[in-house]
Image (cartoon, rainbow, N blue to C red):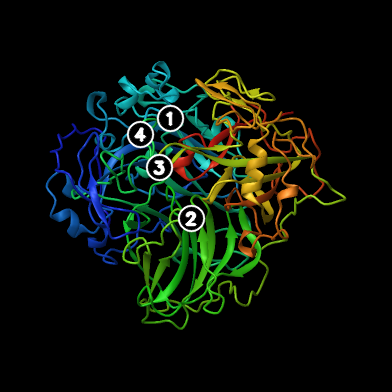
Amino acid sequence: MSRFVSIGSVTLVALAPVACGNNQQPDRIEFRQSASVQQPQTALDGATVPKYVDAMPTFSNRRSNGTTTQNVDMVEFQQRILPASVYASRPAPFNAGSYQWGYRINGAAPSWPSLTIETHGTATSVNYRNLLEGANGARPVLARYLTVDQTVHWADPLHLTQNNHCVNGPPLAGPCVQPYNGPIPAVTHLHGAEDLSQYDGHPDAWWTPRFQQTGPAFVTTAYNYNNQQEATQLWFHDHALGVVRLNVYSGLAGNYLIRDNRDTGAANNPIGLPAGNFEQELLMADRQFDTNAQILFPDGQPEGFNGPPPNPEHHPFWNPEFFGDVMAVNGKSWPFFQVEPRRYRFRVVNASNARFLRMQLHRDTPAGAIGPAIWQIGSDGGLLNAPVRLSNSATAAEFFLAPAERGDIIIDFAGQAGRTFIMTNDAEGPFPSGDPPDPNTSGQIMQFRVNLPLSSTDTSFNPANPQRPLRTPMVNIKPTAQRPADRTRDLVLVEVEGDGGPLEVLLNNSHWNGNREGTTTAIPGSVSNGRGVSATENPREGTTEIWEVANLTEDAHPIHVHLIQFQVINRQTFDRDAYRAAWDATFPGGTFNGITYPPGTYIPGFGPPRNYLTANAAGAVGGNIAFTPFLQGSPTPPPADEGGWKDTIKMLPFTITRIAIRWAPQNVPAGGVVAGQNLFPFDPTNPPGYVWHCHILDHEDNEMMRPYLVAK
């Protein structure tokens, strides 16, 4: 059993410094010196952590009833993520577990992940409290291990970044080159939910303990979730501007299940889906630890797990992506799960900061024979029209999730009594051009042991031979010739390079606040939310749009759009280099942030090179030249596992991803809503508005996020 020790009211313990030691490059057996700026740490080699010695924590019989008010506290505690033997040899206070931040729900013990909230079609009221502080208002212990880079746009409770113009460096000086040392800002986002924006966890809606400081979009700590969308698995996590990578990494995450009258969660559900102990949530994430068994998030001083910060003269502590060498499921490193020889339903979320997971089952060892098939029956926004077989020795198909994506799967262990299976991961990091995972660490996720006796005859839904449909066919919102889109937007993902590597990654070459680089001038066509940020994406309620997003970078980006579920139309490769040359040539030139750019030269953070609202040659707004002359081959429809409702989608490098987005509830029939008509049970045009962003948290925290406002 996991041990959770709450320390919210305990006096902080002085931690002894630890000498610098060796550290590991992502997915390579190579070690380098590493130290934390605030609390010296020596990296623990993940390969030395024993695997498959602890049972996976489960939530099936202790979910929190979302039909009642949820009192959710953000607190600090200790949790034994690694095996007990690792903590036993550590000195106090580390022997009690790894310091974590997490959610304490209705007085139950806090944990990472938190208790799952399960709701059955009625609204859920949640009262959030930020209690992330120690005795007498001191900073929590874990804050010493999490270095906030004050040179990125972030919550900035003490206004140090703003007052010292840290985002305009170099040169950097004073607070800009120091870690933040103030109160902890936090705000919770229910990922994938259709809700009023004041309950959405807007990045600027954060607050600190005792409301000492609040963000410009702060409205309330009492949220109301409608739960009127299709039955699905959502998840909730921190969303405070510019520190999401740290707060989520610290443990602020949990699952949220919406039920309906078919997917009830009960054993007698009309679909026959596995239920009770045969339905389990799996929250997966990679982590790194130090030799005191405390989590380690590299800040690059002098050099971290993922290499040194690529541009320390701009961002002294920010790294482009985090990759850990310990895999955890439900808050346990490399756990095992005992199963009966029957079908199980697993609700999986990739909660990693940056690591993609491409999973397969192997018998006995990571290199063993392919195990039983993995069938996907649902995605981010609900059930698929039909099951999709993902794991197959003949086709080598795999279960593939980017950060924040969810997959609803069934695995049939019938006929496998006495066997064990390892769930492996072979996704490169960064994906797809990075290194393959180390087969001894991040290449393994968890173990299944088919060693429980069959408790009853398995009559559950069989995805290989369905006795009944999963659902009535989902509403198809993809535009047609008879039902064209109200608007098409051509948008780009672009990486800004510094002298040493990535400096930031931008959506449509625009910064979070919507201003031109180094100015207070909003990008033309922007609309202010009245709280300090301006949006160029301002769709009308009731409209259906096509977003064509061209990825000009070499990495895949999981793009998440708040408020709605969308559908993938297709993907198509394009000549990135030729497009980039033509796109760069359209920039007008000028002086920004002290740098003069001649005409025809790319201007980072300028926004799109042309007027956003003037349609290009293909009739699309967005301020970018048309993609059409640069397209290659034919469009590729989404694979079957991406054929359902999505709120997060992998946008592959040198590829245009086309999605259909409709600002109306999922169940509205195709053609059942028109522009200017609001069918949500709330007003989506109310401020502060919503956002769309990359869900690689290190990217999201450094400008790869934009506000959007729904218009009347």
Question: Residue farthest to the front?
Answer: 598
Q: Earlier along the polypeptide chain: callout 2 or callout 3?
A: 3
- What element does badge 3 sit on? helix
- In the rendering, which numbered label is found on residue 108? none
Q: Residues within 10 Å of mark 4 (few under 14, many from 20)?
A: many
How far apart, in angstroms, are the residues tagged by discs 3 and 1? Answer: 17 Å
- What residue is shown with label 2? 431
Q: Amino acid at mark 3?
A: Val
Horizontally, is 533 left or right of 711 in the view? left
- What element does badge 2 sit on? loop
Q: Amino acid at mark 1?
A: Val
Q: Amino acid at mark 4?
A: Pro
Q: Quadrant of the C terminus?
A: top right
- What residue is shown with label 4? 312
- What residue is shown with label 1? 152
Q: How many marks?
A: 4
Q: Quadrant of residue 662?
A: top right
Q: Residue at x 56, y 69 (%)?
A: 390
Question: Residue farthest to the right?
Answer: 482
Q: Earlier along the polypeptide chain: callout 2 or callout 4?
A: 4
Q: Quadrant of the N terminus?
A: bottom left
Q: Earlier along the polypeptide chain: callout 4 or callout 1?
A: 1
- What residue is shown with label 3? 248
Question: Residue farthest to the top?
Answer: 163
Q: Nearer the viewer's eye, disc 2 or disc 4?
A: 4
How far apart, in angstroms, are the residues tagged by discs 1 and 2? Answer: 24 Å
